[in-house]
Amino acid sequence: MESLKNDLLLRAARGEQTERVPVWMMRQAGRILAEYRAVREKAGSFIKLATNPELAAEVTIQPVDLLGVDGAIIFSDILVIPEAMGLPYEMEEKKGPVFPKVVQSVADIDSLRIAEPEADLAYVLDAIKIVKRELDGRVPLIGFAGAPFTIFCYMIEGRGSKTFSVAKKALYADPEFSHKLLQKITDSTIAYLKAQIAAGANLVQIFDSWAGILSPAQYREYSLPYIKQICDAISEAPVTVFAKGAFFARQEIGNLNCSVVGLDWNMDPTESRMLVPNKTLQGNLDPCVLYASYDQIRKEVRNMIEAFGTQRYIANLGHGVYPDTNPDKVRCFIDTVKEFATTSAL
Ligand code: CP3
């Protein structure tokens, strides 16, 4: 067994007691640090950076050194899965990801392959191995993947969207086609997460960023069963399920074979504890709180911890940190969590 100097995050994920609340931030690698932008500049583009294991490892570790978080998250993107299945993406400056080709027919699905991580995603696995060596047990490493439904959205729509109505249209128009693609993504994702854990990831998070665009009934049909398959397949490390906007599915997510349920800021901590009584909760500060004054940030963070309690809890934002956030405000968030006195007797 690897020995970690700071294993608060892992212990909290496993439901064990912790002497203080662990904290990290979704999208902590990239986005806010000048030091990240310098490395990205050197690499030339996001994709060149993400596919260069040495540089990806460097930006993965930056938030540990510069912000003091209790976990590192591997620098990559959820869209490496479509790429590994045969649908490459491009990252357009200011616009985000774009897929030159999209999936439109059953023949298109048949032309995709189930990702083979050791061959197709070796650059991520190599980055994980470098990070593990360089972290030298300082904090745990988080691996991740998109939830099948969120990946489906991008593979059908080909770019970001406020409504993903083209992807949703496919669910209504052709359920069989939709399930076929979702299953292929799921098989790829299971192999990928297992490979990340084998390479050294200590826990993994599933990002269902677009969960909130589905009705409860559609969520039950098109997203949950595939997340369930992933959770049931992964017993090697704790799994976190973060389904943004799926307040209506908290109870069902809490009943999955996962260790941690991630919450966004629309979800009330007390209500969430009631709906998910026996899992660790993660979240859920509104990222916009980090635009407030230092005093206001401290107040909001303390209120949040008081509402969640200090055990079975991982402090985080309710979604990724916004790119124009002042890193000093981020440090204020992290330091306030770390300074919060744990009241329960240990
Ligand atoms: O958490 C981390 O810091 C690890 C790295 C990470 C990235 N993307 C790097 C990235 C993670 C965990 C992701 C996940 C991701 N990617 C999600 C799920 C989480 C969420 O925020 O909902 C989604 C939906 C994507 C797809 C994606 N990638 C979009 C929509 C964009 C463009 C807008 C944006 O978020 O910046 C990306 C690009 C991307 N992924 C960047 C980074 C650092 C910015 C690219 C750049 O540096 O030019």
Image (cartoon, rainbow, N blue to C red):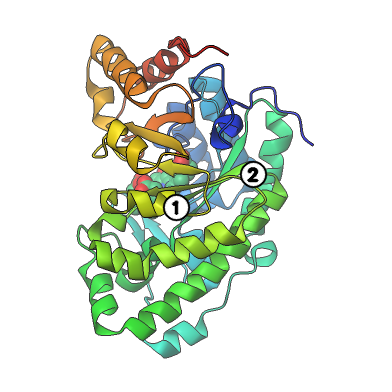
Give the x, y percent position of residue 90.
Answer: 41, 61
Give the x, y percent position of residue 74.
Answer: 56, 43
Q: How busy is the neighbourhood of tag 1: few (under 14 within 10 Å), some, or many (20 plus)?
A: some
Decide if ligand 1 comes within 8 Å of the CB at mark 2: no
Give the x, y percent position of residue 64.
Answer: 55, 26
Whole-Å distance between the Cαs marked 1 and 2?
24 Å
Q: Which quarter of the figure is the C terminus placed in?
A: top right
Residue labelled with disc 1: 255
Q: Nearer the viewer, residue 320 or 94?
A: 320
Q: Which quarter of the figure is the N terminus placed in?
A: top right
Q: Is residue 196 above or below residue 41?
A: below
Q: In this rendering, would 19 be left or right of 332?
A: right
Q: Nearer the viewer, residue 119 or 337?
A: 337
On residue 201, the disc is 2
Regarding mark 1 in the picture, which secondary structure is present there? loop
Q: Amino acid at mark 1?
A: Asn
